[in-house]
Amino acid sequence: MRALILAGGKGTRLRPLTVYTPKPIVPLGNRPFLLTQIETLKRAGITNIVMSLSYQPDKIEQVLDDGLEYGVRLQYLNEPNPMGTAGAYRFASDFLRDATVIFNGDILTDIDLAAVIDFHRRKKSLATIVLTRVENPAAYGLVETAADGKVVRFLEKPTPEDLAELNLNTINAGIYILEPSVVEMIPPGENYSFEYGLFPDLLRQEKSFYAFIADDSYWLDIGTPDRYLQAHKDLLEGKIRNLHFDAPRGDFEAAHTAEIDRVSFIADGCIIKPSARVINSFLGANVYVEEKAVIENSVVWAHTRINHGAVVTNSIVGRGCHIGRFVTVGDNSILGDKTTLTDYTQV
């Protein structure tokens, strides 16, 4: 079995963080995000992975290279134009002659993928979709299944009446397994989606189409800044299992009077000066935190300087930023790479 990771999006919802950094390699736990999906695939015994790229592909290839460092073999395909999820799968089909596991490129999960593969094989399914449960299903398109797991229908933008009647909260988790014959149902060279093209076709033609409900797995779409920040908070709270992240403490310098809680991640090369405080946060490599600065519930990317007395709370600060003296970066602020805030600025 092989895998395809759909990582061609521009990361528009995650801007300004993705202006210079493609979404697949934004840091999570001080590692490129895509390594979480690669690790999940590898844990299920899948080591041949095709990456479907479009936006800043050279940066992704430069970071991940051929994948051998991570125990897998990566191949890269660049879409000539936006092709949609199913169109990208069709475009990559020459490299995917076996059954294929497909990941949307912004899904963070610790799912037991081997269990999904076993389910797919036991059901002798032509296509399997992974579903997850959410607390607020009104914000998503819902997927209804029969008692045996067969997909019954997709319900977009359900009304409160729909939700009350169906008592349904399962949504598309962005993970699929497709048998190779499925590719013939996708028109070549067209922008075509799984959600609005292929999957309705499977239902109309009454193909063998099943859903695996991932009840025991962590799942989050990190494609917006608030969810990206939430992913880091969940990591610090221990909600994400079965995934490897770098050690919370790298090789860094901290003054004796600096306050660093036990859960924060501090990468190599950081310098934390006297009376500075780092609480429930992630500091990338070579972040410089001056005296009496406070970083709380936040993510700070590499090579950023937080000056004397500045306060950053519940925010994301991009790479190479300069936060001046006594600046306040308030809740839910998102600073893109190379942002400079002069002294006493309040954001």
Image (cartoon, rainbow, N blue to C red):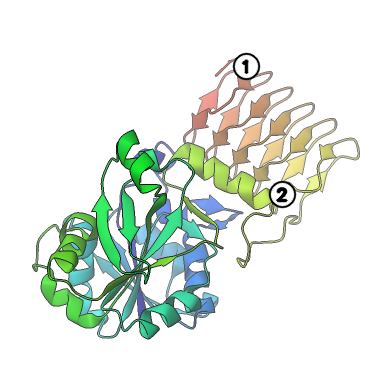
* Residue beneath the point at 64% across and 29% down: 313
Q: Position of residue 122 (x, y in %)?
A: 39, 84
Q: CA distance from mark 1 to mark 2?
A: 25 Å
Q: Position of residue 37 (x, y in %)?
A: 47, 66
Q: Position of residue 57 (x, y in %)?
A: 32, 59
Q: Amino acid at mark 2?
A: Ile
Instruction: Tell me if mark 1 has few (under 14), some (14-19) or many (20+) residues whose alpha carbon lies within 10 angstroms of its own.
Output: some
Residue placed most toward the observer, 145 or 81? 145
Label 1–label 2 contact, CB within 8 A: no
* Location of residue 337 with respect to 340 vertically, above or below: below
**Mark sitting earlier along the chain (1/2):** 2
Which residue is tagged 2?
A: 266
Which residue is tagged 1?
A: 343
* Residue beneath the point at 81% across and 42% down: 261
Number of marks in the rendered image = 2
Pick the quarter of the image with the N terminus: bottom left
| Res. 19 in view | no
Residue placed most toward the observer, 128 or 99? 128
Give SS at disc 1.
loop
Q: Position of residue 218 (x, y in %)?
A: 55, 57
Give the quarter of the image for residue 295. top right
